[in-house]
Amino acid sequence: MIKFIAAAIWICAATLGAVFYSFQAAGERGVGETPKPMLGGLDYVKTDIISVPLIRNAKIDGYFLTKLVYTVEPAEIKKMSIPAEALMTDQVYSYLYSNPQIDFTKKETIDLDAFRKAIRDTVNARVGADLVHEVLIDQVNFLTKDEIRDNAMRRRKDPATPTESAPAESAQAEPAKAAAEH
């Protein structure tokens, strides 16, 4: 009986300590303060791969491929009448075509921080609200026209290997043919 009472007192003390600590931690942050962008309260939305052909001197030089993740206010994104992914894709195209000085063959000319900031700022300006808080890059690639052509040529030279089921099916069909002939 004494062990039961001691355990009950211990549980009450631990619970009161946890409640006291949580109120103090909440007071340090401030009541009603909005959470920081990387700490919660935002939705993370991934785009599909965005492929932008880069044209120079009336010829396609290559393709800029990117996959983005962006943080948005859940209440603001519900108000939108067009899909946010379409807006993000349009802004990536607009940014790359309005900055022809970017040369993807030279890594020195690529400023990913400026790219992220420009996408975020132009989307927010276009929507007229702080919709996008952060643009994160999940993937970024640049393939030249020659690299794409080489990959296509390799695929044509390597014939498709027959599946293992094809010989097994023909072996099963032979006894059926022989039985049909008799």
Image: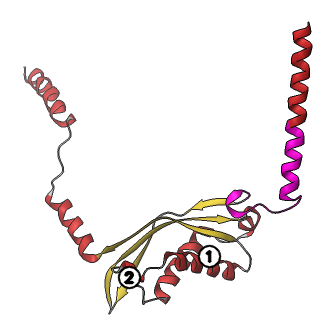
Marks 1, 2: nearer the viewer: 1
Crowd band around label 2 with a 10 angstrom C-alpha radius: few (<14), some (14–19), many (20+): many
Residue receiving disc 2: 54
**Camera-side residue of 109 and 44:** 109
Range of magenta residues: 18-41
Q: Secondary structure at mark 2?
A: strand
In magenta stretch: residue 176: no
Residue 83 can be seen, yes or no: no
Q: Splitting the image into 4 quarters, where does residue 66 fall?
A: bottom left
Residue in the image at 77% along x and 64% along y: 75
Does residue 76 appear left or right of residue 91 in this picture?
right
Q: Nearer the viewer, residue 15 or 124?
A: 15
* Residue 120, label in figure: 1
Residue 45, x across and y down, in percent: 60, 61
x, y percent for residue 141? 39, 69
Q: Residue at x 25, y 71 (%)?
A: 147
Helix, strand or loop status at disc 1: helix
| Left or right: 61 as drawn, with respect to 27 | left
Characterize the magenta stretch by its predominant secondary structure.
Answer: helix
In screen coordinates, is 80 left or right of 153? right
Is 32 part of what is drawn in magenta? yes
**Image quarter of the N terminus:** top right
Q: Position of residue 101 (x, y in %)?
A: 42, 90
Q: Quadrant of the C terminus?
A: top left
Disc 1 or 2, which lies upstream in sequence? 2
Q: Which mark is residue 165?
A: none
Query: Colour mode?
Result: secondary structure
In the image, 104 versus 168, the foreground residue is 104
